[in-house]
C-alpha cells in the first residue's frame, strides 16, 4: 500500500492522528455538563447525529465557533468508483494503513520467533478486534499447517483414544462465543515506572473476538474420560510444542476447540487450523495449532507451568497456575501519546474493561488521580469474559488532570492499584498478571502521558 | 451419619448423571462420534510430555556431561553463549541458585526448575529453536547433564538417564505455591479516597 505524506506523519506520532485523537471531536457549542454520566443512550442518540457530522467534517478544532469555509464538490463525487473485482479479500482503505499491530518495542526481544505483537487498542472501534490486528504471542514463530494433513489426538486416561481430522471436527454442531483474550504478560513493562508511551505498548496484549468451535467436553465424552483423569494437557503442533495442563473442571465448563474467529477460519498466527480457547484465562492456556489432548491425573509441571507464567511472591516463592485474568480496565482515549488539541472543553473518555471471572458490573473514572470517582456508562452488549466498552463525558477545564478507570466484576472483585498488588506480590523482574489501575496524566497543554508508578 | 451417607450418595448420583463430560456453558452433546479410534502405540511418536515430578515418560537412553558439552557446542552455543553463560540471543542458563530472595532473581534451569526432568521435556520438544525435535534422546540427556553440571547440581561423571534424572535435588523444589487469588482486596471508594498508589508506596510502608 502506498504511503502518503499524511500517513508517514501519522506513523511518527502515534496517538496524535485525527482518527482517534479527540481533536477530531469539536467541542460542540453547548454541552450539557450537568448531565450525569449515565444520561444514557437516548440523550447520546439525540446528539449523536449532529456530533458525528461535526467530527467527520474534520478540520480545525478548538473552542471557537469559527465560520467554516465554503464547500466545494470533491473529485470523488464527479467520477466513477472502483468496480467490484470477481473475487477478493477486502482490505482497509490506504488512509487506514496506520492501523497495525506493532511488535513489542518496550521490552525488545533479540529474535522474533519467541516474541509478541501488540494490538492498537486506542484505534479499535467497538469491542471486537479485527483479525488482522489481533495481538500475537508465539514461542517459535507462526506455524503453517495444512488443514488436510492436520490431526488432533485425544488420549491418556480415556477409554478410547481418538484421532480427528479437521473434517471430522467440523461435522459437529458448533458454538460461537464472544470472549476477550489477554496475555498474562500484558502491562508487564509498566509496574514501577512509565516505560510505555501508548496504551498499545502498555496494554496491547489484549484483544477480543467471536470464537467458533466445538466444546472440548463433547470430544472428551466421546473418548470416555477415566474418573482418575483430573487434568487435561493441551499441546501445540508448532515448533515450540507449547503445552499447558488445565484442570478438568474448567475443561468441562467452557473450553472450546476453536477453528473460527470473527466470521472466518483462524488466522495462521492464531493457531490455524485449530486452537484451544479457554475463556477468561491467560492467553497461553489457549494453546494454538492444537495437536494433542492428553487426560492425566495431575499437571506435568513443564517449563511453561513452572519457570514461565508463574508469579514472584514474597520469601522467594512462586505462585503457580494463576490462570484466571482478573478484572481490569484501561482508558484508551485519551491515552498516552495523544493530545487534547481542541483545548479545554468536551471530550469523551472511553476505554475497555474486562474480567476473566465474569461480567463487568461497574466502571468508575477518576479525573484527579483517584481522590474522587464517577461512574462511567457501560455500552451494551456487556458479556461474560468479554471486552466491555465504557464511556464518560468529560468537560476538561484545561487544568492538569490525572485520569484512570477502575472496574468491578460480577464476583464483587474491584480492580486494585499497583500499590494494592505490591502488598501481596513481589514486583521483581518479569512480573505477570498486572491488572492494576492505570493512570494517564493530562498536562495543561493537553498532552497525555503514562503516569504509572 | 445418615446425612453424611445421603450426601455421599447424592454426590455419586450427580457424578453418574452428569458424568465428567457435562459442559455447563454449552448445549448438550449430540449423540454422534466422529473421532477415529487409534491405539496408544500409534500415538507414541507424538507422546513426548514428561510428568516432571516423577520423571514418568522419560525414554530409554543416556548421556554424559562430556557428550553434552559436544552437543552444546554444536547446537546451542550460537544463541546461548559459551558455557551457557548467555549469548547473542538469550541470557544465562547458569547460576542464580540462592537468588530467589534477592533482587534481581536470576532465573536459570538450575535456580528455577523445581524438577530436573523439566529440562528434558523442554529441550526435546522445543530445542534447538531452528530444528526442534531433532536431537536424539541420548543427546537430550547429555545436554541436560551438561547444563546441570554447569549449575553445579551434578558431578562431571554423572550419567543422565530416566532413573537418575528425577533424583537430582533441585534447589527451587519447594518454592511453588498454588494460585490463591484473589489476593488484593480493593474497595470501590467514590469520594475523598486515597490517591492511586504506587509499588514504591507499598514497599515504603512495608519497610516502615
Image: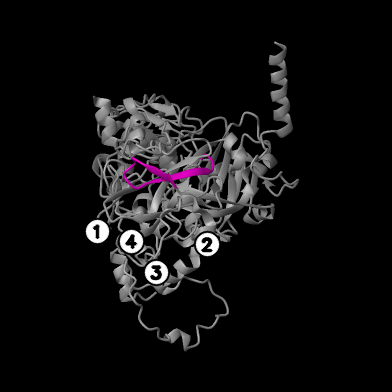
- Measure the C-alpha gap from mark 2 to mark 1: 31 Å
The residue lying toward the viewer, choosing from A382 and A324, is: A382
Q: Residues within 10 Å of mark 3 (few under 14, many from 20)?
A: some
Disc number at residue A45? 2
Q: Gap between marks 3 and 4, in whole Å?
A: 14 Å
Depth check, mark 1 against mark 3: the one in front is 1
Question: Which residues are the magenta region?
Answer: A357-375
Q: Is residue A402 above or below residue A225?
A: below
Q: Which residue is mark 3?
A: A97
Residue A236 vs residue A120: left or right? right
Residue named by callout 4: A15
Q: Which residue is labeled 1 in the image?
A: A445
Task: Find numbered disc 3 in the image and state the secondary structure of the residue it sits on.
Answer: loop
Q: Is residue A119 visible?
A: no
Classify residue B155 by image quadrant.
top left
Q: Residue at x 71, y 34 (%)?
A: B18
Residue drawn at point x = 66 percent, y = 52 percent:
A174
Q: Position of residue B106 (x, y in %)?
A: 28, 35
Q: Quadrant of the C terminus of chain A?
A: top left
Specify the quadrant of the image occupied by residue B171.
top left
**Image depth: mark 2 or mark 1 in front:** 2
**Residue A150 lies in the magenta-colored region:** no
| Left or right: where A93 falls relative to A61 | right
Q: Is residue A60 left or right of residue A44?
A: left
Q: Earlier in the sequence, mark 1 or mark 3?
A: 3
Judging from the image, what secondary structure is the residue with disc 1 in?
loop
Numbered disc 4: what chain?
A: A
Q: Judge if badges 3 and 4 mark residues of a common chain.
A: yes
Q: Quadrant of residue B195 in the image?
A: top left
Amino acid at each position: 500500500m502506498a504511503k502518503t505524506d499524511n500517513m508517514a506523519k501519522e506513523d511518527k506520532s502515534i496517538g496524535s492522528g485525527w482518527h482517534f485523537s479527540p481533536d477530531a471531536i469539536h467541542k460542540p457549542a453547548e454541552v450539557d455538563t450537568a448531565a450525569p454520566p449515565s444520561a444514557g443512550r437516548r440523550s447520546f442518540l439525540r446528539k449523536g447525529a449532529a456530533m458525528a457530522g461535526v467530527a467527520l467534517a474534520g478540520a480545525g478544532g478548538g473552542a471557537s465557533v469559527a465560520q467554516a469555509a465554503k464547500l466545494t464538490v470533491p473529485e470523488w463525487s464527479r467520477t466513477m468508483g472502483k468496480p467490484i473485482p470477481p473475487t477478493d479479500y477486502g482490505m482497509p482503505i490506504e488512509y487506514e494503513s496506520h492501523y497495525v499491530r506493532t511488535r513489542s518495542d518496550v521490552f525488545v526481544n533479540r529474535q522474533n520467533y519467541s516474541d509478541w505483537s501488540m494490538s492498537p487498542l486506542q484505534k479499535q472501534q467497538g469491542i471486537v478486534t479485527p483479525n488482522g490486528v489481533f495481538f500475537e504471542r508465539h514461542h517459535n514463530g507462526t506455524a503453517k499447517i495444512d488443514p488436510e494433513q492436520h490431526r488432533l489426538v485425544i488420549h491418556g486416561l480415556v477409554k478410547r483414544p481418538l484421532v480427528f481430522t479437521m473434517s471430522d471436527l467440523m461435522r459437529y454442531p458448533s458454538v460461537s462465543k464472544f470472549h476477550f483474550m489477554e496475555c498474562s504478560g500484558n502491562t508487564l513493562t509498566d509496574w514501577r515506572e512509565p516505560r510505555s508511551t501508548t496504551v498499545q505498548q502498555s496494554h496491547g496484549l489484549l484483544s477480543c473476538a467471536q470464537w467458533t468451535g466445538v466444546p472440548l467436553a463433547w470430544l472428551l465424552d466421546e473418548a470416555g474420560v477415566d474418573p482418575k483423569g483430573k487434568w487435561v494437557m493441551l499441546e501445540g503442533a508448532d515448533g515450540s510444542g507449547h503445552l499447558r495442563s488445565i484442570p478438568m473442571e474448567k475443561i468441562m465448563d467452557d473450553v472450546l476447540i476453536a477453528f473460527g474467529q470473527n466470521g472466518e477460519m483462524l488466522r495462521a498466527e492464531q493457531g490455524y487450523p485449530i486452537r484451544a480457547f479457554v475463556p477468561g484465562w491467560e492467553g497461553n492456556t489457549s494453546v494454538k495449532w492444537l495437536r494433542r489432548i492428553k487426560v492425566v491425573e495431575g499437571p506435568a509441571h513443564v517449563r511453561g507451568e513452572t519457570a514461565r507464567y508463574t508469579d514472584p511472591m514474597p520469601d522467594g516463592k512462586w505462585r503457580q497456575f494463576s490462570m484466571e485474568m482478573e478484572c481490569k480496565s484501561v482508558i484508551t482515549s485519551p491515552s498516552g501519546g495523544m493530545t487534547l488539541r481542541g483545548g479545554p472543553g468536551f471530550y469523551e473518555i472511553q476505554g475497555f474493561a474486562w474480567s476473566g471471572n465474569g461480567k463487568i458490573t461497574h466502571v468508575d473514572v477518576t479525573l484527579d488521580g483517584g481522590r474522587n470517582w464517577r461512574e462511567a456508562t457501560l455500552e451494551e452488549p456487556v458479556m461474560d469474559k468479554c471486552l466491555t466498552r465504557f464511556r464518560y463525558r468529560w468537560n476538561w477545564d484545561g487544568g492538569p488532570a490525572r485520569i484512570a478507570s477502575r472496574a468491578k466484576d460480577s464476583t464483587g472483585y474491584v480492580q486494585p492499584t499497583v500499590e494494592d498488588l505490591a502488598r501481596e506480590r513481589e514486583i521483581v523482574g518479569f512480573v505477570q498478571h498486572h491488572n492494576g489501575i492505570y493512570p494517564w496524566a493530562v498536562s495543561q497543554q493537553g498532552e497525555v502521558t503514562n503516569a504509572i508508578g | 451419619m445418615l446425612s453424611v451417607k445421603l450426601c455421599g450418595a447424592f454426590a455419586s448420583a450427580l457424578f453418574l448423571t452428569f458424568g465428567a463430560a457435562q459442559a455447563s456453558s454449552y448445549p448438550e452433546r449430540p449423540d454422534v462420534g466422529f473421532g477415529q479410534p487409534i491405539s496408544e502405540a500409534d500415538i507414541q511418536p507424538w507422546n513426548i510430555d514428561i510428568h516432571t515430578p516423577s520423571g514418568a515418560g522419560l525414554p530409554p537412553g543416556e548421556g554424559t556431561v562430556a557428550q553434552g558439552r559436544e552437543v552444546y557446542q554444536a547446537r546451542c552455543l550460537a544463541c546461548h553463549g559459551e558455557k551457557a553463560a548467555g549469548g547473542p540471543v538469550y541470557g544465562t542458563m547458569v547460576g542464580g541458585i540462592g537468588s530467589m530472595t534477592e533482587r534481581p532473581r536470576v532465573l536459570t534451569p538450575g535456580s528455577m526448575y523445581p524438577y530436573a526432568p523439566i529440562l528434558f521435556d523442554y529441550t526435546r520438544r522445543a530445542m534447538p529453536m531452528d530444528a526442534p525435535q531433532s536431537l536424539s534422546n541420548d543427546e537430550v540427556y547429555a545436554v541436560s547433564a551438561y547444563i546441570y553440571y554447569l549449575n553445579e547440581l551434578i558431578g562431571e561423571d554423572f550419567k543422565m538417564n530416566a532413573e537418575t534424572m528425577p533424583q537430582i535435588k533441585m534447589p527451587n523444589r519447594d518454592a511453588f505455591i498454588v494460585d490463591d487469588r484473589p489476593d488484593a482486596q480493593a474497595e470501590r471508594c467514590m469520594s475523598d479516597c486515597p490517591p492511586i498508589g504506587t509499588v514504591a508506596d507499598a514497599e515504603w510502608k512495608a519497610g516502615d
